[in-house]
Amino acid sequence: MIMDHVEFDREPPANLTTMVMAFRGWIDAGQAATGALRHLVRDLSATRLAWIDPEQFFVFTQERPEVRLRADGERNIHWPRSEFFAWHPGNGRDGLLLFCGVEPHQKWRTYTKAFLDVAERCGVRRIVSIGALLAGAPHTRPIRVTGRSSDPAWRSVLEAWGIYRRPSYEGPTGISTVVLDAAERRGMSHLGLMGQAPHYLQHNENPAAIQALLTYVARLLNLSPDMSHFAEAIKDFRTQCDREVARNRATREHVQQLEQQYDATAGEEQQGLPSGELDSEKLMQELQDFLRGQREGGEER
């Protein structure tokens, strides 16, 4: 099958009615979104369906291709990946289209059209977007997740879980917002889940944030991914964070302050899935501060 900017591994099915997407970039703090998506792909044994050719959308001096060695010692070049995976539950039921990619540098409207052309061809009617931002969240407490949706049924679920938040942010945005806006104009409904990762940690991967997003996606889509390994990974992660925080008095005091803020709002949350958020104005300020830092210091990769 031929489609602009997209290469298919096989003929796409037309009954992948729900899509889950995650982009690596500044709304992927702690690699929570892409980590959760990759876990789903592995756990469901989803198979690659298609990929977006990176040539038109990336500046390769910013997002460089990587050279990797094969088992025979020969080298392969790996380009920035934006891949679609298909999963079918069997019994004639509709399947899932899973997407994991890198936020493109340029031609976002062209990229979005190619992205949604694939979704439309596969029969997607609703999209779940997952992400994570750096926030004033202590690593010693459960990760909080908030959600929003254009779909009344999904919105009611988010409200029942106590995590629905009406959009109020204004300012620079990411590719996922652009995609969801265009998807809505094509008649697709959408839901966004956003986790909060501690802003003071420098770790590449936060297993607690990955697990939190996976938990909500699984409940939302009636999936049962194996998450048994997360308990040990989270324990090790928090132990390492405790050691790092203990080395610096200012950081210790900052974490204690964040814990007090977290605990002060914990009682206000509903008892659905473990969830919640800090004060919305503070959360938006955290995001604005993070964006300002990105503009001053370059994008997180």
Image (cartoon, helix red, strand yellow):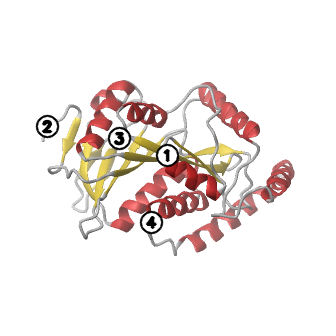
142 left or right of 151 in image: right
Mark earlier in primary sequence (2, 4): 2
Mark earlier in primary sequence (1, 2): 2
Mark 1 vs mark 2, foreground winner is 1
Between 139 and 217, the one nearer to me in the picture: 217
Mark 2 residue type: Ile
Query: Which quadrant is the N terminus positioned in?
Result: top left
User: Residue 195: in sight, yes or no?
Assistant: yes
Mark 4 residue type: Asn
Mark earlier in primary sequence (3, 2): 2
Q: Residue at x 50, y 71 (%)?
A: 227
Element assignment for label 1: strand
Q: Do callouts 2 and 4 mark residues in contact (Cβ within 8 Å)? A: no
Mark linked to residue 80 = 3
Horizontal and vertical percent position of residue 185: 39, 30
Classify mark 1: residues with Cα within 10 Å, few (<14), some (14-19) or many (20+): some
Q: Residue at x 71, y 37 (%)?
A: 286
Q: Do callouts 3 and 4 mark residues in contact (Cβ within 8 Å)? A: no
Residue with the mark numbered 2: 2
Q: Residue at x 44, y 36 (%)?
A: 180
Classify mark 4: residues with Cα within 10 Å, few (<14), some (14-19) or many (20+): few
For the residues labelled 3 and 4, the Cα–Cα distance comes to: 31 Å
Residue with the mark numbered 1: 191
Residue with the mark numbered 4: 222
Mark 2 vs mark 4, foreground winner is 4
User: Residue 52: in sight, yes or no?
Assistant: no
For the residues labelled 1 and 4, the Cα–Cα distance comes to: 15 Å
Q: Do callouts 1 and 2 mark residues in contact (Cβ within 8 Å)? A: no
284 left or right of 96 in image: right
Mark 3 residue type: Pro
